[in-house]
Structure formats: C-alpha cells, structure tokens
Image (cartoon, rainbow, N blue to C red):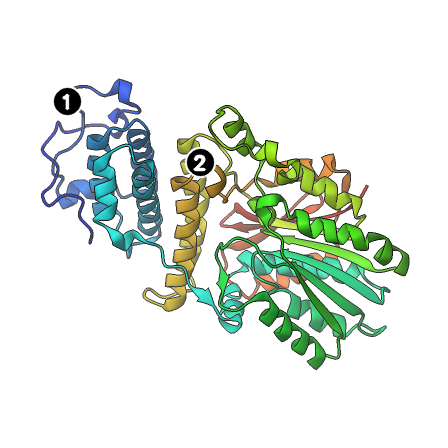
C-alpha cells in the first residue's frame, strides 16, 4: 500500500464531529481540528460513502487553496481507508484519491504535491487496448452499452423498412460494436437485405475503451462479417475528431447530401456516448475571460455542441439516435464536479461486484477505464478535460433547439430492451420518461436513449 509519509502525520486535535472539518483556507485555524494517528477502529468510522465523499471534498478544497499540510493529512487518511482492492466504495474513493494527487501535481504550485505524485508512480492508469473479440466480450458484460445498442438497433430497423440503401454514420465510443447485430437483423429482412454504407470518424481522441487495431482493419473485419451474412457493406473512414465538432465529417456528408437525398437513401446517425466529447460552451467562456489563454470560440464556432447539432439538421437525416450517460460533469467548480462524478460513478463499481471476480483481467480493464474517466474529470481543465457529460434534459433541449423532434420508441423496441436486460443482474431496470428510455441501476438513472427526426 502506498504511503504519503514514512510516519503518520503529527498529532492534532481530535475531532468530535466530521462536519467540523474546514471548508476553505479562510476557515482554517492555527491548530486544525483533525485527528492525529487514528487507530484502525477510528479509521473504520470514515468507511461509509458519505464520509468518504466529504473527505474528498475537503481534500479538493485544500488542494485548490494550496494548503499542502491539510491536503496531505486528508490524503493520508484516504489512503488508509480506501485500498484499491477494497469494496466498491473503497475502490471508487481510491480512484478519486489518485485523481486528486494527479491534480495537485499538475498544478505545479506546491513542491510537496509534485514530490508526492512523483513518489507514487504506481498511480499511473494503464488502460487496456482491446482486440475486437475482447471488446465485444467486454461490452457484453453489462447493459451499460448493450442498452443503447438494443434501443438504437430496434429503432433503426423500424425506420429503414422498405429502403434498399441505408447509410449509417456511427459516432460510437465502442468502435462499431453494435453494427454486427444490426447487420444480422438486416440480413433477415423479409424484403431482403439493403446495401449498407457505414461511415465512421477515424481520428477520434484516445479515450477508453481503446482498440488495438486501426479503423481500416476494423472495417475489413466488418465487411467480411457482412459478406458472410449476404449483406453488401461499404465501409468508409473520415478523419475527423470530436475536438472540432466532427467538422470534417459534417463537411463530407454535406457534399453527398444531394446525392443520397435524390437516390432515396436512408441516412441514420447513431450517436453512442460520443457527443459529450465535443467541447461545450463553458470551455470557451472560461478562456475568453483571460486574454493569455486560448479561446475555443474564437477558433471556430463549430466546436460547440449546438453548432454540431444544427449542422447535422441541415443533412435532413432519416433518424438520429442519441445515447449517453445521464450525469452532469460540466461544472467549472471542482467540488461540484467531484460530487457529481462520485454520485454517478459509484454505479459501475457497484455493478462490477455482481459479475466480475476480484483479480480478473476484465475487472482490471473495467476499473482502469473508470479511473481514466475520474482522473480526466478531476485532474484536468480546459481542452484536456474531455469528459463533459450532460444530463438527458440538457441534450433534449439542445436537440429541440436544433429543430429536431423526438419520437417514441415502439413497444417492440421496449420489449427488445427488456429481453436484453433479463440476461443481466436483477438490479438493472428500464423506465420510460416521455418518449425516451432510461437504463437504471437500483432505481438510479444510468444511461438514456432518445430518438429524433427533423421537425
């Protein structure tokens, strides 16, 4: 287990109430109300999720106010109550502990923080590069991605009925993993399979889960799979990134717009947990307040999510499926972001205990990907902070503002999703919110699925 000091912090006043912890530098007295060397029994009282969250909040405030002494004391306690191989709450807290150390080191304002991070090189997150088979198996472990796959594919199959050519633009975090199932279903259409054109953005940032092969190689595998199902598949990669709002992708699709519109192609845009990597408006607002900083807004308005959706609307797509995680990581305030992330990311850790044994490789890969997300949310700012989740309500408003109209998922689609959920642990659930579907874990919103057509 890592240690931040060779000996415990010097004894300080004992605390009688956890709420006495100072919230900012101005409230800190000469002698801080903090325990010295807690016994195992005393440390155990900090072991519930609420106390761990409060410790993380106070640590974040100490780091932000550059109070190295208080920060190190809290980090020491966190290190002792949140082992990386503990229960789900402890592993979650350990992920935030790593992220706070990384943030402290990144700030570079205090040599103690930097030395602390340098002394614990084992804090580095080793994300795994998946083979196609590994990734397919990985996303099958939980409904986290399969929920969106099932809802999207069922909706797509309904809307493309009767089309002989369908063009799918797949903006997916999971590297086309839902496409084979869709091809399988299209192969069995009563009227025969359509010609399928599949376009992907091939230069997206390195965010987990990551593949160990190029998109060209992936495309070759998909074409061969489709051929085995007697489906003609054309695969195309357009170098385009989320950081500029997929502007190259939009531009090339716009060039083809008249062609596919006249030929009667169905244009399907499948957005699976990728749109939240497009920088949102607060990013440019922050940097515009400081002339020495770069300004996203001054570079190109197409960086923004609203601009992307409006550009997408000009393509007059047959349907747009938008699936994403139902949380808010956009606050400019570190503590607000920490609380929001802590109260959402407990879910994957909790679910993990139901399907992956300790020590398994898949569990290591799974947790490394979550730790990457935590570190990005907590330790980074500006364009480097790409994990900017927005809740469903905000995406719904964005889509409406871009002149899209939501459509309801059919009962057949709902049945398909429920059938998929039956294959997983009992804690997973499904609920309807107006026209939308929401995946839940123990009653908490996890992922939403929405379907849209031009208004």
- Earlier in the chain: of badge 1 and badge 2, it is 1
Tell me residue 429's x, y (percent). 56, 53
Which quadrant does the N terminus fall into? bottom left
Residue located at (68% from left, 42% from top): 308
Along the line of sight, the residue nearer the viewer: 330 or 312: 312
Residue 406 vertical position relative to residue 419 in the rendered view, above or below: above
For the question of whether residue 406 can be seen, the reply is: no
Along the line of sight, the residue nearer the viewer: 422 or 88: 88
Residue located at (81% from left, 58% from top): 266
Image quarter of residue 76: top left
Q: Residue furthest bottom?
A: 228
Which quadrant does the C terminus fall into? top right
Residue 345 vertical position relative to residue 414 in the rendered view, above or below: above
Q: Which residue is mark 2?
A: 337
Tell me residue 144's x, y (percent). 53, 56
> Is residue 187 rendered to the left or right of residue 238?
right
Tell me residue 245's x, y (percent). 63, 44
Tell me residue 224's x, y (percent). 66, 78
Along the line of sight, the residue nearer the viewer: 252 or 211: 252
Q: CA distance from mark 1 to mark 2?
A: 29 Å
Image quarter of residue 18: top left
| Secondary structure beneath label 2 | helix
| Secondary structure beneath label 1 | loop
> Is residue 156 rendered to the left or right of residue 79?
right
Residue located at (28% from left, 18% from top): 26
Q: Which residue is mark 1?
A: 31
Circle 1 packing at 10 Å, graded few (<14), some (14-19), many (20+), is few
> Is residue 399 rendered to the left or right of residue 318?
left
Residue located at (62% from left, 38% from top): 304
């Amino acid at each position: 287990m890592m240690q931040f000091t060779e000996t415990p912090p010097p004894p300080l006043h004992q605390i009688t109430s956890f709420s006495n912890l100072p919230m900012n530098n101005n409230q800190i007295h000469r002698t801080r109300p903090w325990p010295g060397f807690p016994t195992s029994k005393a440390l155990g009282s900090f072991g519930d999720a609420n106390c761990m969250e409060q410790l993380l909040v106070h640590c974040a405030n100490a780091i932000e106010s550059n109070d190295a002494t208080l920060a190190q004391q809290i980090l020491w306690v966190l290190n002792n109550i949140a082992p990386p191989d503990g229960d789900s709450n402890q592993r979650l807290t350990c992920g935030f502990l790593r992220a706070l150390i990384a943030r402290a080191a990144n700030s570079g304002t205090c040599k103690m923080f930097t030395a602390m991070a340098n002394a614990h090189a084992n804090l580095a997150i080793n994300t795994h590069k998946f083979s196609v088979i590994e990734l397919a198996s990985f996303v099958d472990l939980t409904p986290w991605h399969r929920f969106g796959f099932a809802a999207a594919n069922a909706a797509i199959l309904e809307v493309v009925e009767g089309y002989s050519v369908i063009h799918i633009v797949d903006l997916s975090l999971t590297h086309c993993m839902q496409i084979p199932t869709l091809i399988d279903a299209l192969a069995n259409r009563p009227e025969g399979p359509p010609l399928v054109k599949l376009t992907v953005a091939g230069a997206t940032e390195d965010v987990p889960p990551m593949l160990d092969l190029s998109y060209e190689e992936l495309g070759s595998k998909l074409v061969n799979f489709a051929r085995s199902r007697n489906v003609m598949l054309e695969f195309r990669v357009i170098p385009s990134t989320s950081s500029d709002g997929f502007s190259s992708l939009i531009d090339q699709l716009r060039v083809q717009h008249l062609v596919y519109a006249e030929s009667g192609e169905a244009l399907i845009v499948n957005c699976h947990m990728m749109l939240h990597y497009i920088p949102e408006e607060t990013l440019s607002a922050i940097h515009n307040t400081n002339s020495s900083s770069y300004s996203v807004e001054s570079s190109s308005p197409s960086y923004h999510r609203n601009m992307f959706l409006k550009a997408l609307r000009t393509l007059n797509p047959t349907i747009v499926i938008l699936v994403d995680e139902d949380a808010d990581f956009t606050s400019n305030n570190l503590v607000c972001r920490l609380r929001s992330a802590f109260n959402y990311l407990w879910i994957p850790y909790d679910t993990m205990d139901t399907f992956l044994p300790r020590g398994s490789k898949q569990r290591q890969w799974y947790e490394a990907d979550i730790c990457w997300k935590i570190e990005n949310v907590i330790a980074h700012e500006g364009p480097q902070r790409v994990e900017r989740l927005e809740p469903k309500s905000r995406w719904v408003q964005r889509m409406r503002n871009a002149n899209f109209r939501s459509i309801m998922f059919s009962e057949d689609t709902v049945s398909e999703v429920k059938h998929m959920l039956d294959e997983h642990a009992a804690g997973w659930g499904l609920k309807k919110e107006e026209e939308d579907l929401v995946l839940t874990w123990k009653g908490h919103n996890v992922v939403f699925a929405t379907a849209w057509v031009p208004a």
